[in-house]
Amino acid sequence: MADMDKAYELYKGGFNCGQIVATFLSGPCGFDEREARAGLAGFGGGMHCGENCSAVIGGVSSLGMYCGQRDPGDDAAKKKIGEMTEAFTQAFREKHGSLSCSDLCTGDLHACASYIDTAESIVKELITKDKEN
């Protein structure tokens, strides 16, 4: 479960939901949280136009860092990120009914807390399953 006290502090510091999700997932996924936050800075508010929820984007981005398709021809990593992304988005949509910020959010972290928590939980579950295989 996401640390909502820390999430609120990050939110008050100007970070969006995707940046907060990446902060929480940096350890389990093995990437630098500051770099991830920088890369996700433009995705708040559904890319500032109500499109994809940035908590979803933060979850998918974290999975991408975990799967590590960094080199051409790495078909195994490409397949893994595709499968994990599909599983993530399906589980998120089943729980919340949408992936769209404009459908989900009121712009208040308290309204978005469940999306941050869901994204973190699903990614951690997917990583645990992956490591067991």
Image (spheres, grey):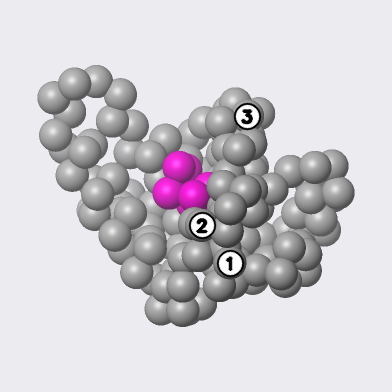
Residue at the image point whose x is 80% and y is 42% from the top: 14
Q: Amino acid at mark 3?
A: Ala
Q: Is residue 58 magenta?
A: yes
Q: CA distance from mark 3 to mark 2?
A: 19 Å
Specify the principal SS of the magenta part: helix
Quarter residue 32 falls in: top right
User: Do callouts 2 and 1 mark residues in contact (Cβ within 8 Å)?
Assistant: yes
Q: Nearer the viewer, mark 3 or mark 1?
A: 1
Could you tell me which quadrant the N terminus lies in? bottom right
Residue 13 image position (x, y, % from top left) = 84, 42
Q: Residues within 10 Å of mark 1 (few under 14, many from 20)?
A: some
Query: Residue beneath label 2, please?
Result: 51
Residue at the image point whose x is 64% and y is 43% from the top: 19
Q: Nearer the viewer, residue 131 or 25?
A: 25
Quarter residue 104 falls in: bottom right
Q: CA distance from mark 2 to mark 1?
A: 6 Å
Residue range highlighted in magenta: 55-62
Q: Which mark is residue 38?
A: 3
| Labels 3 and 1: the sequence-earlier one | 3
